[in-house]
Image: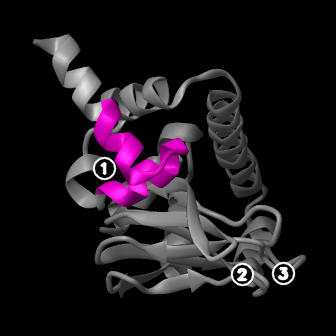
């Protein structure tokens, strides 16, 4: 399983055998049960996660209602960017399924950067990818209809529809479950 993360890093920038060894020595791989909360609103995040297997969700509580803003699946990073070691989180992060995650913490990360500056470059590229994905997601909420967001999700991440409940999909695209049912019905009628 550790190989998955090391191969991920190697796709971004070449890494030396010493860097591979150092990463492998600092990795902590943990299994989290479905429903495990990795970060709660008000907590300061001290950990980042890399999904080896499973699905992790980010959401906000607004007037007692969950508003899903992202799903993270295999080979994706789960980081509360605004909270990582700095300020209390405004969101929740939980496991939608049983999930096998690499758990990293800020202290180990800083130690690796001091010993291997190349790893900081890799980390920067990872964060650039995370930010680009977040920006694309935000743009979708500003420019696409819920039906368009649903279609994009269906095309780009069909695995989510087998992993998570429909009410979370509805929340993610910004509609109530009843509206999602209507969207699905319209789409199936168009495909006939």
The residue drawn where x is 77% and y is 72% is 90
Point 51% across, 80% down: residue: 25
Q: Tag 3 or tag 2, which sits nearer the N-term? A: 2
Which residue, given by chain and number where applicable, does mark 3 sit on?
88
Q: Colour scheme of this structure image?
A: one colour
Q: Residues within 10 Å of mark 3 (few under 14, many from 20)?
A: some
Q: Nearer the viewer, residue 190 or 104?
A: 190
- Please say whether residue 182 is one of the residues in the magenta stretch: yes
- Pointers 2 and 3 in contact (CB under 8 A)? yes
Location of residue 99 (image quadrant): bottom left
Question: What residue sits right under mark 1 in the picture?
Answer: 160
Q: Can residue 18 be seen in this snapshot?
A: no
At horizontal 29% and vertical 68% (from top left) the residue drawn is: 1
Front-most of 2 and 59?
59
What's the CA distance linking mark 2 and mark 3? Answer: 7 Å
Of badges 2 and 3, the one in the foreground is 2
Region of the chain picked out in magenta, as a range: 166-183
Q: Is 2 left, or right, of 115 in this rendering?
A: left
Residues under numbered marks 2 and 1 in contact, where contact means CB atoms less than 8 Å apart: no
Residue receiving disc 2: 41
Classify mark 3: helix, strand or loop: loop
Q: Position of residue 131 (x, y in %)?
A: 72, 42
Residue 59 visible here:
yes
Q: At which x and y percent is residue 32?
A: 37, 85
Asked which secondary structure carries label 2, the reply is loop
Q: Secondary structure at mark 1?
A: helix
Q: Residue furthest left?
A: 192
Name the image quarter holding the C terminus: top left
Q: Is residue 14 magenta?
A: no
Q: Earlier in the sequence, mark 2 or mark 1?
A: 2
């Amino acid at each position: 399983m550790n190989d998955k993360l090391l191969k991920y890093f190697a796709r971004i920038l070449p890494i030396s055998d010493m860097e591979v060894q150092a990463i492998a020595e600092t990795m902590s791989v943990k299994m989290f049960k479905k429903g495990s909360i990795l970060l709660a609103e008000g907590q300061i995040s001290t950990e980042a996660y890399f999904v080896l297997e499973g699905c992790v969700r980010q959401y906000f509580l607004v007037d007692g209602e969950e508003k899903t803003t992202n799903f993270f699946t295999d080979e994706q990073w789960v980081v509360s960017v605004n909270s990582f070691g700095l300020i209390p989180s405004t969101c929740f992060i939980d496991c939608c399924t049983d999930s096998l995650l690499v758990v990293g913490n800020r202290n180990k990360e800083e130690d690796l950067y001091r010993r291997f500056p190349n790893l900081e470059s890799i980390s920067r590229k990872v964060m650039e990818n995370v930010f680009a994905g977040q920006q694309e997601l935000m743009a979708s909420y500003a420019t696409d209809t819920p039906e368009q967001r649903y279609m994009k999700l269906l095309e780009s991440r069909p695995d989510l529809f087998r992993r998570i409940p429909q009410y979370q999909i509805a929340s993610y695209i910004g509609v109530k479950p009843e509206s999602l049912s209507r969207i699905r019905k319209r789409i199936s009628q168009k495909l006939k």
